[in-house]
Image (cartoon, rainbow, N blue to C red):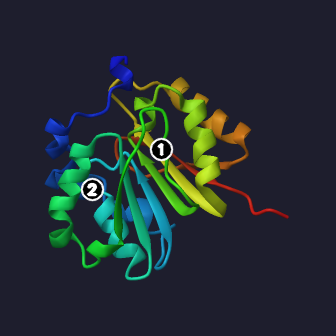
Amino acid sequence: MTAAHRPCPVESAGGLDRRYRYWLQPASSVIDPYVTAGMRVLDIGCGPGYFTFPLSERVGETGEVVAADLQPGMLDIIQSKKHNRTRYPHNITLHVCQSTSIAATGKFDFILAFYMVHEVPDIPALIKELWNLTKDGGHVVIAEPGIFGFTFSHFANTKELCRSQGFNVEDMHGIFLAKAMLLTKPMKE
């Protein structure tokens, strides 16, 4: 596994949940336009739950958030915090991904892949899996670091893979230090 494909270690999880991030990258600006009560959502590469807990609040009593991570230690952090960080701890399902697949089941109204696609060795396989996991008319948000050596060509290649899979792709703006895109899976005719 190359350095570019190495996930953020559990020992560094605290850096993903710092107070300044709540001001610079408010979760609400990323999820509120696309997530409503009762939805089933997938937070891939959820880390220590920066987006998981706001998603839990947003989907509410009747929704479900599947917090998926390759590292069980990240999910342990969510488990230890969920009763203090959301009114709906019961709507969070923890899921350990396989090394080559998300391996989640069912379909999702909304999928979030925030700062994790660059960690995946087989991006075409990931995009195909996202397609298969997204409900018709559902949305996927992919955000990647906008600095620190991640090139525009990497992001442009990911966008092209999403288009060729069948997603409608729109650029998203306004997420601090991120390049982001909104994917929509068209409704079947």
Indicate left or right for 76 with 51 as reference.
Answer: left
Q: In this rendering, is residue 118 above or below 91?
A: above
**Closest to the observer, 72 or 34:** 72
**From this viewpoint, which residue is outermost toward the bottom?**
61
Q: Amino acid at mark 1?
A: Ile
Write down the quadrant of residue 149 in the picture.
top left
**Closest to the observer, 172 or 79:** 79
Indicate left or right for 42 with 48 as reference.
Answer: right
Which percent across, then down, holds residue 118? Answer: 43, 31
SS at mark 2 in the image: loop
Figure label count? 2
| Residue at mark 1 | 102
| Residue at mark 2 | 49
**Closest to the observer, 169 or 121:** 121
User: Which-is-in-front pick, marks 1 and 2?
Assistant: 1
The residue located at (29%, 77%) in the rendering is: 88
**From this viewpoint, which residue is outermost toward the top?**
2
Which percent across, then down, holds residue 4? Answer: 37, 22
SS at mark 1 in the image: loop
Residue 25 visible here: yes
Residue 170 visible here: no
Q: Amino acid at mark 2?
A: Gly
Badge 2 crowding class, 10 Å Cα cut-off, few under 14, some 14 to 19, many 20 or more, is: many
Which of the two labelled residues, at mark 1 and mark 2, occupies the earlier sequence position?
2
The residue located at (16%, 63%) in the rendering is: 81
In whole angstroms, how far apart are the C-alphas of marks 1 and 2? 17 Å
Which percent across, then down, holds residue 146? Answer: 40, 35
Q: In this rendering, is residue 147 above or below 188?
A: above
Q: In this rendering, is residue 75 above or below 115?
A: below
- The quarter in which the N terminus is drawn is top left
Indicate left or right for 66 with 74 as reference.
Answer: right
Which percent across, then down, holds residue 144? Answer: 42, 38
